[in-house]
Amino acid sequence: MEKPRKPMPAERPSAPATETVGAVVIGGDHPGLAIARSLGPRGIPVFVIDDQHSISKFSRYTTRVVRVDDLRDPQKTVDSVLEIGHRYGLKDWVLFPTRDETVMAFSRHRERLAEFFRVTTPAWDSTRYVWDKYNTYKLAEQIGIPSPRTWNVGSKEELASLYCRLPLAIKPAIKENFFYATGAKAWRAETPDELNALFDAAAHNIQTSEIMIQEIIPGDGNCQLSYCAFFRDGAAHSTLTARRLRQHPREFGRAATYVETADLPEIEELSQRFLRAINFYGLVEVEFKQDPRDGQYKLLDVNARVWGFHGLGQVAGVDFPYLLFADQLGRHAEPSRGRAGVGWLRLLTDVPTSLSALAKGYLSLGSYIQSIQRTEVESVFSWRDPLPSLAEFALLPYILKRKLFHIAS
């Protein structure tokens, strides 16, 4: 495997050409809405591009929403973003991707996009270490960061050597094709027959070379931790750490439903070591899980974009979208650190998640009530900007089909 290049100083953005420079957000679900609610109140215009019905369309802080046919194909995504940029005169505006496939598209076509936009996505030399999880785990091993034991097998016949290690997880190295086809982040295999059957099912959706067989770290969201940062010049400018206390599904959390900030210095050094190794620039979430068997914090994933609960930063003292926007325009922004004990809630998914956890004894009623009391921000609802929440309720059947569970049409 090629060694990651040594960190180099991040390029400094040029001064803005006009005073009307704004943001172009790709994806108008709740992560995109949180970007609009960060920048819009500051008078920064926000364009949202989406290939689905978007709740951001109803926000008072969104300037315009443009619907396109396809944001999953890299070439079509880049072509659409550039066409819209030229059509509306968005020269030098700042790009904010909210999905992994958009990060990949922007990274691979960075030079072309940078001729017109301010591109916040790192070059492919950096991004490839987070796009392909085989690269992620190989680099982690090289630089001394613990991660779950992971195997790749060339055929189903080779699975027999892993039967003694069951239960095991079947996961994709590149999650987008698998995720959009199955709606799952990973599958659990308890028996040899389940392992064989799930391997066949995975091979039906993705290439065999992309199928990872991985040890399962015990525990739920209480053990799953996030390091969130605006990272530049080989160091963290501003940070927040949090626990994903509730997520769905419970074991392989596809998305967090309740998150709470916490002081977690143990994962800060590990995260920064990884980000320095890939010369990362921008907003990032690094996910870990603490293994109760040995106490180690093990690297699970790296998201090179805004993450689902990044709006938590705005109430905890770290306004991530504005920090990145200001840096792109050469404006000074004071470093910040998130305060502990602040809750973020995704009500739409947390209600069924919590009811299930209460019924099965994973969650006590007292703990649930305390978490609601600590909640300072909901993913969509806001008294200052109520229409997106009403729109989400109206669009609930569509959201359940298209977004929450990604049922293929």
Image (tube, rainbow, N blue to C red):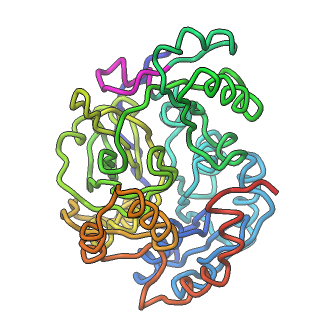
Which residue sits at x=77%, y=65%? 68
- For the point 61% across and 77% down, the residue is 55
**228 left or right, relative to 84:** left
> Where is residue 316 drawn, in percent x and y?
25, 69
**Is residue 273 at all visible to an observer of this figure?**
yes
Is-magenta flag for residue 388? no
- Give the percent coordinates (x, y) of residue 258: 38, 64
Q: In this orientation, which residue lies closer to the viewer: 183 or 264? A: 183
The image shows residue 310, relative to residue 124, as above or below, that is below
Q: Position of residue 15 (x, y in %)?
A: 43, 63
What residue lies at 58% left-to-right and 48% top-to-bottom?
100
The image quadrant where one finds the C terminus is bottom right
Q: Is residue 325 visible?
A: no
Camera-side residue of 183 and 161: 161
**Viewer-closest of 267 and 42:** 267
Whether the magenta-drawn stretch holds residue 139 is answered as yes
**What span is in magenta?**
137-150
Q: Is residue 264 above or below residue 159?
A: below
Above or below: residue 235 compared with residue 201: below
Q: Is residue 27 left or right of residue 384?
A: right
Q: Is residue 348 above or below residue 268?
A: below
**Residue appearing at x 64%, y 23% in the figure:** 193
Residue 146, horizontal then vertical, whole percent: 31, 26
- Left or right: residue 335 versus residue 23 is left
